[in-house]
Amino acid sequence: MWAMVVSYLSPSCVPAVSMFLNTLTPKFYVALTGTSSLISGLILIFEWWYFRKYGTSFIEQVSVSHLRPLLGGVDSSTPNTSNGEANDSNRQSVSECKVWRNPLNLFRGAEYNRYTWVTGREPLTYYDMNLSAQDHQTFFTCDSDHLRPTDAIMQKAWRERNPQARISAAHEALELEDCATAFILLAEEEATTIMKTERLFKQALKAGDGCYRRSQQLQHHGAQYEAQHRRDTNVLVYIKRRLAMCSRKLGRTREAVKMMRDLMKEFPLLSMFNIHENLLESLLELQNYADVQAVLAKYDDISLPKSATICYTAALLKARAVSDKFSPEAASRRGLSTAEMNAIEAIHRAVEFNPHVPKYLLEMKSLILPPEHILKRGDSEAIAYAFFHLQHWKRVEGALNLLHCTWGGTFRMIPYPLEKGHLFYPYPICTETADRELLPMFHEVSVYPKKELPFFILFTAGLCSFTAMLALLTHQFPELMGVFAKALFFINFLSTLFAPLNFIMEKVESILPSSLWHQLTRI
């Protein structure tokens, strides 16, 4: 800084500057360094808080978002192909960061609320519940709801934020006539046990099936009737799937499997509910591994979207063939067999898709209740998978031991997961932000890959420490630090004077041949 000041000074100004420096008291240097330390400390605290909350540096974000375009950081002459590729990558990132409905989500009244009563904690975030409200309005309402009083009441009920207001509206609709969506709301939010939930869903099935058959006959009479039929189809599928989940929770697993198979045959095109993931979990509970493999053969296809349930279930089946006899010491002596290689590759594939799952399966992190929505490849999906499938991994002898011994090798194959993947697309960078919105505050969100501290946090920490040390030394040794400051000024002044000569010498060295320059230096 002093060198820059001196470079703009004329020779006549040097005595004036020297006199000004001689008049400065030690208190000035103490105030200067103390103020600098205070300001850099405040910047450090703010940067650290912003990094802990949002996972990025505030200064870096402002520099990239606002200052870089002003300074010409965006090249307007970039070809259109590059813009197209950038848009494609952005679309890919957005699709990978899409939030999905959890196919195994719990019942809000019978399970989530019971957790709140016992612990006093809220397992669902406002963002998660707001997404559920949007789903309900999409699935259970249509533009012609105003034609029927019960549907009009339920349309308002799904938009209510207060749970008691929603429940009261559902009871009001049932006073007029049996309404399938009113029974759904009461089963989800008012029933306090799974048995009561199942009873209400059976009433909803009776009412919903009648509406579905009537709208099925009228669906070709116009767009309005087609919308009603689409709504009634969503209602019926939802009811049957939740009834199957009730049977699974009450121990009637075979009945649940039959209901899910029938539902998938009756409505094969409604893949948005991901009923096959419910079916996989139920088949694993029955230890019917042949049927599990048959379901995987249909849904673990390169053209279909993947999930943690698909990838880790495939890994579990391959691990089951070798895990009971697997030993790291024996494998290192004799080498890996083909079956062991296939199992390890399947584990690596699953870990690459979602690297958060192994810590929950190996109980290195504590589980919480899964949210109603998940982010694929994120911590929320890992919690939802491990919550229901940990028991299936424990049931297979040696499977968790094999996972423990091999899952870390995945990260050696993809040292830069945000830039390049191995079997899947690069790991999306938006998972941490979305998971923080989906998961409750008392849960520590798993972050992959681990983020290093931003440069500006380290810089401000060093600046704060350095200026604080200078302030302390100036306060303790004012005369010595004053002499040091003056000496530093004159050193910078001399280096500024000799800067042109050094520049000329460097140019001469670069132009002349090394042999000739060596002879000249000897002369």
Image (cartoon, helix red, strand yellow):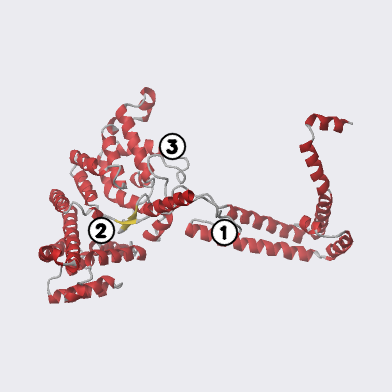
Disc 1 is placed on an element classified as helix
Q: Nearer the viewer, residue 184 or 23?
A: 184
Please give the name of the residue rendered at 28% of the width and 44% of the height, measured from the top-left corner.
Answer: 310
- The answer to which of marks 2 and 3 sits earlier in the sequence is 2
Between discs 2 and 1, the one toward the N terminus: 1
Q: Residue at x 18, y 58 (%)?
A: 237
Which quadrant of the structure image shows residue 193? bottom left
Mark 3 secondary-structure assignment: helix
Q: Residue 83: give x, y in percent of width and height.
A: 47, 52
Q: Residue 288 lies in what quarter of the image?
A: top left
The answer to which of marks 1 and 3 sits earlier in the sequence is 1
Residue 466 image position (x, y, % from top left):
68, 55
Q: Amino acid at mark 3?
A: Met
Q: Residue flagged by tag 1: what amino acid is it?
A: Pro
Distance of mark 1 from mark 3, alpha carbons? Answer: 36 Å
What residue is disc 2 on?
106
Q: Which mark is residue 69?
A: 1
C-alpha separation, residue under disc 2 versus residue under disc 1? 47 Å
State which mark lies toward you, 2 or 1: 1
In the rendered image, residue 50, in percent from the top left (x then y), is placed at 52, 60
Residue 330 visible within the image: yes
For the residue pair 269 and 372, the one nearer the viewer reads as 269
Q: Which residue is mark 3?
A: 413
Quadrant of image for the N terminus: bottom right
CB contact under 8 Å: marks 2 and 1: no
